[in-house]
Amino acid sequence: MNRIPSVSLRGDAAEADAAALARWARAFCVIRFDLERGQLVEACFPPDALAHGGLDRLVAFSSFPDSMSHHLPRHRSSVHDSLFSFRIPDPSPSASAGASRRGFLYGFVFNRQRQDERLPRGGEQKSVVILSHAPYSSLFRLLLQILGPLCFDIGHTALSMVASHVAAWPAPAPGCPMELPIGSAALRVHLPPAADDPGPPPALLPANPSVPYGLFHDADLFAAFRGLLLHLWTLWELMVVGEPILVVAPSPPQCSEAVAGLVSLVAPILYSVDFRPYFTIHDPDFARLNALAEGEVFPPMVLGVTNLFFLRSLKSIANVVSVGSPNPNSTRVLPAGGQSPASANGANGTPGKLKLDKLAINKFSPTGLLNSIKLRREGPLSLMTEHREALWSTYVTTTKPDTSVLNRLIDAGASPRIEESMSVVNNEILRRHFLELTTNFLAPFGPYLRTTTPLEGSSPFVDPPLLPPFHADEFVNGLAARGPGKFLSKRMRSNWLDLYRKFLEGPNFMPWFRQRRSAAEQDQQRLWKQARMNVDIEKLMSKMSELERIDSFNVIERYLLKEMENSGTASAESTAACQKLKTDLQVAFSVLPKDMQQLLLSNPKRAVLLQGSQEKVPGFDHIVSQTSL
């Protein structure tokens, strides 16, 4: 955002609704790097938001470039601003009490490095941080572009001012577009789906790829991996099966953007592996990882780092990818062979298609072969002397790069303005392809998640059929007999079945499958309930035998009691369902034999239901538990 909207304080920010603020953010902080004492929390709103389990130190250490990062050249301007993010364990007692999964907090950082010869050591560093339980990167990046400069302009009062506006926002609507007012502007964002949202069915490709179907949909995938585009399919595989990955970059913005891009690559799979967009040696998990014994398997994690010390301390990670340019003001990578962008696209630097021979060495050359051998022999430790973009992995890949996708990518030429717009186009191309790739990969699981509705003319007053049971061995055998399908067969090697085996055994499959299964079961219950609301009960009963009518009466009564038990909210939908079932119950009763009617009416509580009373039946809980159906 080029223009910072005006933000004014409305009333006393200290009186802002803490619960309303917590829906969006945990804390707004200003962190200062003190030459004598290190990282210090200079201001925080709410004041006690970082008061649990050393959270203040953890946030402070995660909010600055690592002291042992790649050496950054002096910037031409006296002020250098950057945005990056981190993810840390939540030490608050409420984050782990009774929770089956570990709680995490997301930090979004506006870091300013100011050079001034009058200051000690010639400069200073400060960071403005938004801490939240929600990974709303697209929102908090925009908000930081307002809050960050505002803090440097007017001081710490900016924290409480912006907090008062955030507290006035409506509750988050995950998966939906929102317009959130902030001062004289409005932030228009499309929030990612909630963590428990299973996403679209695996056999259905979303029509609009710009709608987020997973976390970090706004990540700049093309810029982060421009020098490694041919390796994106390998990285996709590593993420799908949950392999540990160390992402090395010259700066926090570059490594955090790369990790976010990797997580977004496998949408709509629920990525269940621990990931850290910016990991430092001060993280409490570092001691545990550093203490792994020789030969011990590294746990599934994706770690974004800038400190080269990790190359030695975490050398048991089998997959290392280095990304980014040592120049923090540019994410561009010169084409292979040392050509300039102008010479690759034309003398005037006009946009053109990216050429595959500029992305990687597809043709044999002695120099390229020697460089490749040297890179493989030295391994990731070669980054200690010179940063380069590369992937080191022992993983045997299944998926082949789709050169038709790469050929559609556009090279921006020498113009930064054109590069920004072309990056949007390229990200759309890549995002669409990997969404299609993941959707086709998940399609064979569709039969196990397929819902059913009552057949036309059949009774909806029966229990819906259970979804087909899933057995991994049967699934793999059936898949081997059917084949991978047309889309995947063109993009996978003969060992494609190994990818499914690794996915089934990895950390991502079961959380995703359980979530999809639960969503399918709920959807099926909804469809059958809708069928019961739409059925013509008189027409249905006219086709039934006497025994079927008695069974249907009992089932309708059971559904009515269940609906009444769940209608505590007294919603319009629940009230309508109760009324429809009461009417159906009376119709079903009217076609029963007289002796059966007399027997049923001998129960006074059932008689109340048959009379259509809207009042709460005395001893209703007893009816629910004791009525024989």
Image (cartoon, helix red, strand yellow):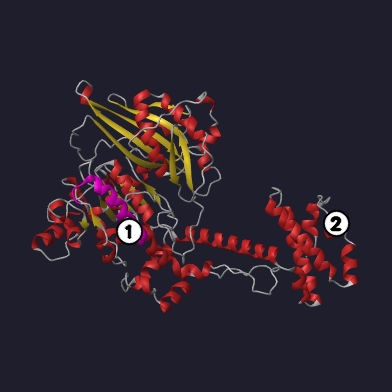
Label 2 sits on residue? 608
The quarter in which the N terminus is drawn is: top left
**Closer to us: 383 or 466:** 466
**Mark 1 crowd level (few <14, some 14–19, many ≥20, 10 Å Cα):** some
Label 1 sits on residue? 429
The vertical placement of 274 against 369, above or below, is above
- Residue 385 location, quadrant: top left
The vertical placement of 397 against 79, above or below, is below
Mostly what secondary structure, the magenta segment? helix
The answer to whether one can see residue 514 in this image is yes
Tell which circle, 2 or 1, labels the residue nearer the N-terminal end: 1
**Numbered disc 2: secondary structure:** helix
Q: Does the magenta segment cover residue 420?
A: yes
Q: Is residue 357 left or right of residue 474?
A: left
**Mark 2 crowd level (few <14, some 14–19, many ≥20, 10 Å Cα):** some
What residue is rendered at 53% in x and 29% in y?
16
The vertical placement of 142 against 267, above or below, is above
- The part of the chain drawn in magenta is 413-433
Q: Is residue 71 left or right of residue 5?
A: left
Callout 2–callout 1 Cβ contact below 8 Å:
no
In front: label 2 or label 1: 1
Three-letter amino acid code at disc 2? Val
- Residue 66 location, quadrant: top left
Q: CA distance from mark 2 to mark 1?
A: 63 Å
Three-letter amino acid code at disc 1? Ile
Q: Is residue 196 left or right of residue 39?
A: right
Give the percent coordinates (x, y) of residue 101. Answer: 49, 49
What residue is rendered at 85% in x and 71% in y?
592
Give the percent coordinates (x, y) of residue 24. Answer: 49, 39
The quarter in which the C terminus is drawn is: bottom right
- Residue 534 location, quadrant: bottom right
**Closer to us: 278 or 516:** 516
